Image: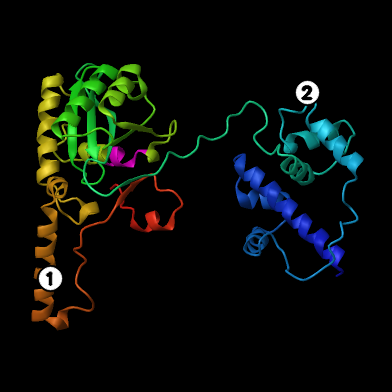
Amino acid sequence: MGGRGRRHEQEERQEALELIDEAVKDGSRQAEAAETLNIDPRTVQRWRAQDGGEDRRAGPLSAPANKLTVVEREQVLEVVNSPEYRDLPPTQIVPRLADEGVYVASEATIYRILREEGQAGRRGRARSPAPKPKEHVSTGPNQVWSWDITYLRSALRGQFFYLYLIVDIWSRKVVGWAVHQEESMDHAAALIAAAATAEGIEVGDLVLHSDNGGPMKGSTMLATLQALGIAASFSRPSVSNDNPYSESLFKTLKYRPEYPTRPFEDTSQAAAWVAAFVDWYNTEHRHSAIRMVTPAQRHVGTDIAVLEARDRLYKAARHAHPNRWSGSTRDWSQPGLVVLNPGRSPSTKKTAWKAA
């Protein structure tokens, strides 16, 4: 096959991959999109592994014979940016034109032209996905807190009590909580201020992460954070994975064997149960994400001595009975940095500790 033919084949493969990507973005499965184009899904996988199917053989650098002329390219742009079609993606434009007996270019060609013209963003009124929240790294206690509100069932059908709860992501210690009859930015602001005072937070010390609810982003709450010198961080709308530490803690709370099977009669009863839970969680619960020490131990640094003692014990046991050990002893070193919403940096991905 000549160089021009190979280049044309490569362009066709790239166009097919772009069409498949667009179909997947619109909700289709990759295999179904590939089959629609009469391409075996395994072929698509092979093309992706080969950077779109490039055969890496040298060939002429001249333009392919089937390249659109300048006039044809302008016609494509005129059509897709017309009032009738400017809010539609190429996958909608091409078949509509076909129904009118008009063909200007394939979907993939139109996508390529739009990309080259800087018009490859979402068409229409659909908003682009919200960017991932900024990565926050914690190397010790009281650097990054996460907080949220969860429902507690009340005895009155259709009504709930609300548990406000703050957790330090480094130590997993609950540093503040309260139970109220309603969601309120005033309650939230008061809780954050009390927790910051109790933990001795100084201006610039702390990042506070939460979701996008009203109590989290209300004017009173934001003013309180500004006055305390606390930086606010927010999850993307409707993305609970951006706030995994609070979500994990709520799961632990509601899956406790002691969690009441009957609704709470009032906020006093609910608060009494939460107080007992927080005491157990902070001082007795050996947390799997922090080498099975308690959040209270890690928060004040006594976990280091605990972990060192465990390490000595295991090494002594191995020395006494080496035939019972097939490898090194269990890793009892203190976990390193904790990352909220880790980005693409390999260093943080390797050292980030899970929320569970």
Q: Main secondary structure of the magenta part?
A: helix
Label 1 or label 2, whichever comes before in sequence order? 2
Residue drawn at the location 33% of the way across and 41% of the way down? 244
Label 2 neighbour load within 10 Å: few <14, some 14-19, many 20+? few
Q: Is residue 161 above or below residue 107?
A: above
Q: Is residue 115 left or right of residue 232?
A: right
Residue type beneath disc 2: Pro
Q: Position of residue 31 (x, y in %)?
A: 63, 52
Do we see residue 339 in this rendering? yes
Q: Is residue 12 above or below residue 87?
A: below
Total numbered labels placed on residues in the image: 2
Q: Position of residue 212 (x, y in %)?
A: 39, 27
Residue 217 placement: quadrant: top left
Judge by depth and name the residue closer to the eye, 281 or 113: 113
Q: How is the image coloured?
A: rainbow
Kind of element beneath mark 1: helix
Q: Residue furthest front?
A: 203
Q: Position of residue 321 (x, y in %)?
A: 11, 81
Mark 1–mark 2 CB contact (< 8 Å): no
Residue 348 placement: quadrant: bottom left
Q: Disc 2 marks which residue?
A: 83
Residue type beneath disc 1: Tyr
Judge by depth and name the residue closer to the eye, 2 or 225: 225
> What's the distance in space between the residues labelled 1 and 2, CA to CA?
73 Å
Q: Is residue 158 left or right of residue 18?
A: left
Magenta stretch: includes residue 199? no
Kind of element beneath mark 2: loop
Tell me, for residue 314, which label it has, or none: 1
Per the rendered image, the range of residues in magenta is 243-248
Do we see residue 158 in this rendering? no
Residue drawn at the location 73% of the way across and 38% of the way down? 91
Label 1 neighbour load within 10 Å: few <14, some 14-19, many 20+? some
